[in-house]
């Protein structure tokens, strides 16, 4: 059985847990980026959500021309294609306009799986389009090791608490038409933060490294699909330790430094840590009950 953990390659990143798998990949042949969410039952993997954006980009702030998605909402499969409207004026305070149509072909991805071969120091993953990706072991864990005992917080271990309180897998639900609806999962490890969330109005799929310190969290996205879509030129860099500048934690708001964002400590107590987030938000990291 494939070991749970994080596997990273030049054009691929995949996180595997007991219940769910998220894959992020680049296809130069199809000129697209893709995220997929799989439900897992032992060695069986079944796609329950997919997001494709094109063309492939390596830089931030470039709007995709096409979005293709499929997801299962309360047992109902929905597939869409969104095409960018040309010749529109883009403003920083307004979202771009896309023409949305149903896409029955995207629904055919739901229920698909992948082939994975486990070698001594890496894995090979083959998707249904025949593309084979090689990825190296980055973190190996089981779901229990992601949920360690939690220490009492003090000035000297705020960073440790930020990391441990945020670790593990969370299923995400929101109310849609009055029903609690599953929209994806969040998976946080010792080194990485992963998310796959999809609603009819929004997409948020990303892979990122992070470092938790006593002054806050540094967060660096190497793959993102949201308003924009990109994967860094060589995604293998996501295996490297994340460098940061502690002086950037001095602000009372989030600070961007290239792809890294700094969420600085606002305050803490025994049950909650508050960080200065982006757009004036305060991020709440609550101590989980275990």
Image (spheres, rainbow, N blue to C red):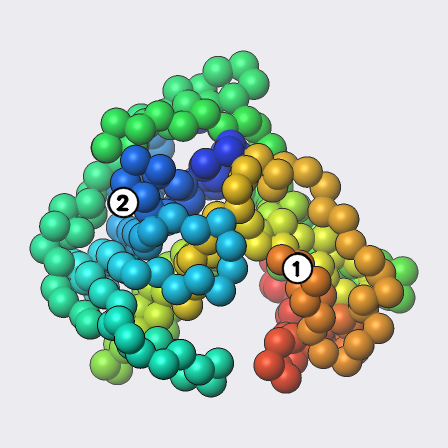
Q: Nearer the viewer, residue 139 or 105?
A: 105
From the top left corner, tell me how far across and down residue 68 is, in percent: 24, 57
Q: Nearer the viewer, residue 65 or 237?
A: 65
Residue 127 lies in quadrant: top left
Label number found at residue 171: none
Residue 147 visible in the snapshot: no
Quarter of the image for the C terminus: give it: bottom right
From the top left corner, tell me how far across and down residue 214 is, in percent: 83, 62
Q: Left or right: 288 with respect to 183? A: right
From the top left corner, tell me how far across and down residue 257 is, in percent: 70, 62
| Residue annotated with mark 2 | 47
| Residue annotated with mark 1 | 258
Q: What secondary structure is found at the residue carrying circle 2?
A: strand
Q: Left or right: 269 with respect to 66? A: right
Residue ID at (84%, 61%):
246
Residue ID at (57%, 35%):
236
Residue ID at (35%, 76%):
96
Residue 231 visible in the snapshot: yes
Quarter of the image for the N terminus: give it: top left
Residue ID at (78%, 54%):
244
């Amino acid at each position: 059985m494939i070991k749970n953990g994080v596997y990273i390659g030049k054009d691929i990143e995949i996180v595997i847990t007991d219940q769910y798998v998220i894959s992020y990949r680049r296809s130069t042949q199809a000129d697209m980026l893709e995220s997929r969410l799989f439900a897992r039952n032992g060695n069986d993997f079944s796609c329950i959500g997919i997001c494709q954006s094109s063309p492939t980009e390596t830089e931030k702030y470039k709007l995709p021309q096409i979005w293709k998605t499929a997801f299962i909402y309360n047992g109902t499969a929905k597939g869409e294609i969104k095409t960018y409207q040309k010749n529109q004026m883009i403003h920083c305070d307004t979202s771009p306009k896309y023409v949305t149509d149903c896409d029955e072909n995207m629904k055919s991805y739901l229920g698909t799986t992948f082939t994975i071969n486990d070698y001594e120091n890496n894995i090979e993953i083959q998707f249904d389009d025949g593309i084979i990706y090689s990825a190296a072991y980055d973190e190996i864990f089981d779901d229990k090791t992601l949920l360690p005992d939690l220490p009492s917080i003090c000035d000297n271990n705020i960073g440790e608490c930020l990391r441990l309180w945020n670790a593990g897998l969370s299923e995400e639900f929101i109310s849609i038409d009055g029903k609690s609806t599953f929209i994806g999962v969040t998976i946080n490890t010792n080194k990485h933060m992963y998310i796959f969330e999809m609603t009819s109005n929004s997409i948020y799929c990303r892979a990122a490294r992070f470092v938790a310190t006593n002054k806050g969290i540094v967060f660096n996205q190497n793959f993102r699909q949201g308003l924009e879509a990109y994967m860094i030129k060589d995604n293998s860099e996501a295996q490297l330790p994340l460098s940061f500048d502690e002086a950037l934690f001095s602000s009372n708001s989030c600070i961007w430094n290239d792809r890294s964002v700094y969420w600085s400590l606002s305050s803490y107590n025994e049950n909650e840590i508050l960080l200065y987030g982006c757009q004036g938000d305060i991020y709440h990291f609550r101590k989980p009950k275990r």
